[in-house]
Image (cartoon, coloured by chain):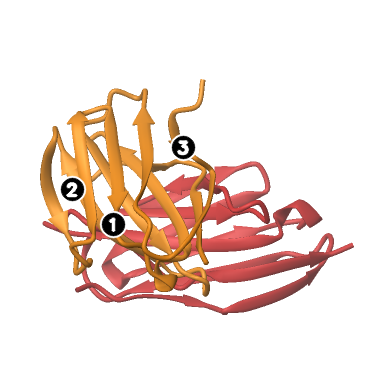
Chain colours: A orange, B red
Amino acid sequence: DTAVSQTPKYLVTQMGNDKSIKCEQNLGHDTMYWYKQDSKKFLKIMFSYNNKELIINETVPNRFSPKSPDKAHLNLHINSLELGDSAVYFCASSRFSNTGELFFGEGSRLTVL
Amino acid sequence: GIQVEQSPPDLILQEGANSTLRCNFSDSVNNLQWFHQNPWGQLINLFYIPSGTKQNGRLSATTVATERYSLLYISSSQTTDSGVYFCAVIKAAGNKLTFGGGTRVLVKP
């Protein structure tokens, strides 16, 4: 059983489209995250939810909207996709929001043409 | 925010060699993790080590929290050790895991 799973793993789409990436964790963790990895491999946090409540919202365009229907799921919806949104998006979870080990999903590679 | 610097940025090793990767951070932390991103892009947890020393097979890590650094040791390197090694920390009283820029390791046969 995969602990943190993301779908889809690959996504190729045109500029201006809207797309979603889904994430689920079966670890019983309270906190989930979205990270973005750019072409230079730098990893930066975008959002974090603790028990369905948004606790971290970095400087991210409001075209990105996370949604957490329950504490095991955190989805990322992106409107009006731009070329610069091309990246690998990683979902992660941890038991607590301020300590404890984070576990990452396999990543979703988004390519905007 | 907290600064996390990793060195060296790139490392080329001959199979069988040993190496040490370093992670410096600018503030007190209550979480420090080492990850290996393999050539397929997966982020593999290596160590959760906010302080002390841990060993797992050919890998070991030491964090000296009072001096704000952590070291990752790779012994008898293998080609499968190639990839990018990331250090990441959560600042004390913080809630964000902040990554360093990574060390890119290539192990040649």
Q: Nearer the viewer, residue A94 or A66?
A: A66
Sequence-wise, the earlier of marks 3 and 2 is: 3
In front of the other: B46 or B95 = B95
Q: How many marks?
A: 3
Q: Which residue is drawn at the image coordinates 14% and 32% (left, top)?
A: A51
Residues indicated by labels 3 and 2 sit on the same polypeptide chain: yes
**Can see residue B78?**
no
**Residue highlighted by disc 2:** A98
- Identify the mark at residue A79; answer none if there is no mark: 1
Q: Position of residue A20 (x, y in %)?
A: 36, 44
Q: Residues within 10 Å of mark 1 (few under 14, many from 20)?
A: some
Q: On residue A7, which mark appears?
A: 3
Q: CA distance from mark 1 to mark 3?
A: 17 Å
Q: Nearer the viewer, mark 1 or mark 2?
A: 1
Badges 1 and 2, same chain: yes
Which residue type does callout 3 highlight? Answer: Thr
Secondary structure under tag 3 reads: strand
Find numbered disc 1 in the image and state the secondary structure of the residue it sits on: loop
| Residue at mark 1 to residue at mark 2: CA–CA distance | 30 Å
Determine the residue positioned at 39% across, 50% down: B49
Between circles 1 and 3, the one closer to the viewer is 1
Q: Mark 2: few, some, or many residues within 10 Å (few <14, many ≥20)?
A: some
Distance between mark 3 and mark 2 Cα atoms: 26 Å
Horizontal relation, residue A10 to residue B94: left or right: right
To which chain does the residue with label 3 belong?
Answer: A
Q: Amino acid at mark 2?
A: Asn
Q: Which quadrant of the figure has residue A94? A: top left
Give residue A90's position: percent from left, percent from top: 42, 50
Please state the chain letter of the residue tagged with numbered disc 2 in the rendered image.
A
Q: Residues within 10 Å of mark 3 (few under 14, many from 20)?
A: some
